[in-house]
Amino acid sequence: RRAVAMMVGGTVGKAGRGFVCTRCFPQSQVLSTSLFWSSSTLFRISASRRLFVSVPRDDPPGSNKSVAHSGAVPIVAIVGRPNVGKSTIFNALVAKRKALVYDTPGTTRDRAYGRCEWELYGECVVVDTGGMMGDKGEPMMKGIHDQADVALNEADVILFTISAREGLGDPEWALLRHLRRRRAKNIILVVNKVDSEAHATAAENLKLERLGIDRVVYTSAIHKEGLHELMQEIVEVFPLPPVAPKTRASRTNGAAQGEEGFDEGDGVAPDNLEAESGEGPVVGLDDHPRIRVAIVGTPNVGKSSLLNRIVGRERSLVSDIPGTTHDPVDEVYEWANKEHDPDYTDLPASASLVFVDTAGIRRTSRHRRDLEHLTAMWSERAIEEADVTLLMVDARDALSEQDKRLVTLILDTQRSFALIVNKCDLVPDAKRNRARWEEEKTAAMQREYAFIKHTDVLFVSCLSGLRLPQVAQLAVRTHSQRSLRLPTRDLNEVVKRATAVHKPPSQGMAPVPSRARAALRLR
């Protein structure tokens, strides 16, 4: 066994009289030994107690596994062909409308993460992926496959999802071969869309034993049926840790109760599994603030590219085709105040930023109910849930009427925002004299829209990396201004000057107090 372990390149663990290859058995269960040894850790356990031990393993070549994922919370990835109900299963498990569900195949493109908490079974992180087809010739399909492969690298359990209506086809066999080539383990076959007796009969006649997967679960995610059986299979394949007391909700059976009574907040990617999004229950133990930053704008202005450059990897799918992003994509970024801004001494030493990449918003008819309209609604929801909004525009174009509508939307939701001018490297005048061009561009925008005078403007280039490190600092500084506390004396002075210019009405309204009673905290 030692020779086999060394041949495949894994380290060797000693358990009693036997040996364990940590590459072949990345998660080892020790049942009856009194001593377990690994390359870095020594455990002494009882001979009569079942202990779950997580030992280190090397990632396969080309993996893009999150460096912050320590294995404390298992990850369950949902994969399958397009339009088999993966996003519906994802929403049912996390008990939130986190993933966009639509009848059009290929709705999901990026990875979506959500925390699944069932007191009866435990907690885990569920990953929704885009539909995987056999042909990866198209650039968009290749990007979707790459996103799904990242989820497979991270996953401890894989839910191979098929549809009871469509059965087994070429995409299923191609995906199965793909999983076998990757030596994927802990695979559970999920037969979804068993919504009626006819579908149940069709599912029984699929001859699923040909796939060679022992564990099979029949579900109807839209009716939330079969979820308990699915969780039981997950626990049997990979034991889940109990739900932490601080994150434990008032429910006892998880998503089986439906979506009512649960927060509609978004989950986070596994870069910081110990924290939730701003609107949900806080499970992080960090003292520094958590700031939710939404990146919004019209289609194809570089929102996804900005997120990828900030976090340092391909977190969001990028394409030249407008409308590539559908679901909002979250990613946690830990910011450290290395260069203290002398103008804002109240900035924290560090902060957790949750950047949210959103779908491009362009003007559509209110009566339309197509996919583009739904993605715009989800982007507007991301603005409402954000603390700071970064409005991105194209440096080659003037501010459009749609940009002005987005500003109005942001102000109506009472969210602070800053302006990000992207693609500066594509402007010829900026290449010749950047400082002069930026000054003229800012002056032109201020003449056209008065709100620019009171907004921070940052000129960047996602392609060349120009000023990208300043984006996080800009978000923190904007959030600090949003949380500004005005002293009573300054507030009285502002009220005095305002009433001197615009006299308050003397009839029909209560008189304006001459002095403020307390300090005002801006939000």
Image (cartoon, rainbow, N blue to C red):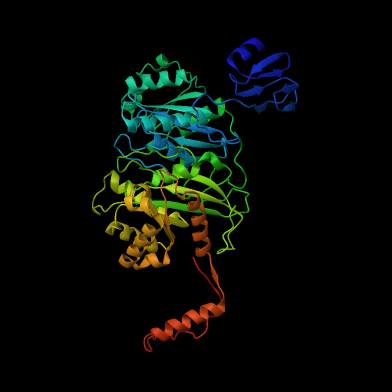
Judged from this view, the residue extending furthest toward the bottom is 506
Tally the marks. 0
Name the image quarter holding residue 107: top left
Between 4 and 419, which is closer to the camera in this rendering?
A: 419
Relative placement, left or right, of 5 versus 479 is right
292 on left or right of 220: right
The answer to which of 39 and 165 lies nearer the viewer is 39
Judge whether residue 46 can be spotted in this image.
Answer: yes
**Residue 302, placed above or below residue 483:** above
Residue 275, compared with residue 63, is above or below; it is below
Relative side of 326 to 39, left or right:
left
The percent position of residue 217, horizontal first and vertical second, equals 45, 26
x then y, percent, for residue 380? 37, 53
- The residue sitting at 60% across, 48% down in the picture is 284
Name the residue: 56% across, 80% down.
489
Residue 50 lies, in percent from the top left, at 68, 25
Q: At 71% from the left edge and 20% from the top edge, which residue is drawn?
A: 32
Could you tell me residue 256's position as x and y percent? Answer: 46, 40
Give whichever of 60, 160 is nearer the camera. Answer: 60
Can residue 1 be seen at all in this image of the molecule?
Answer: no
In which quadrant will I find the N terminus? top right
Seen in the picture, residue 410 relative to 262 is either above or below; the reply is below
Based on the displayed image, in which of its 4 quarters is residue 189 positioned? top left
The relative height of residue 107 versus residue 365 in the rendered view (above or below) is: above
Look at 44% across and 39% down and name the residue there.
92
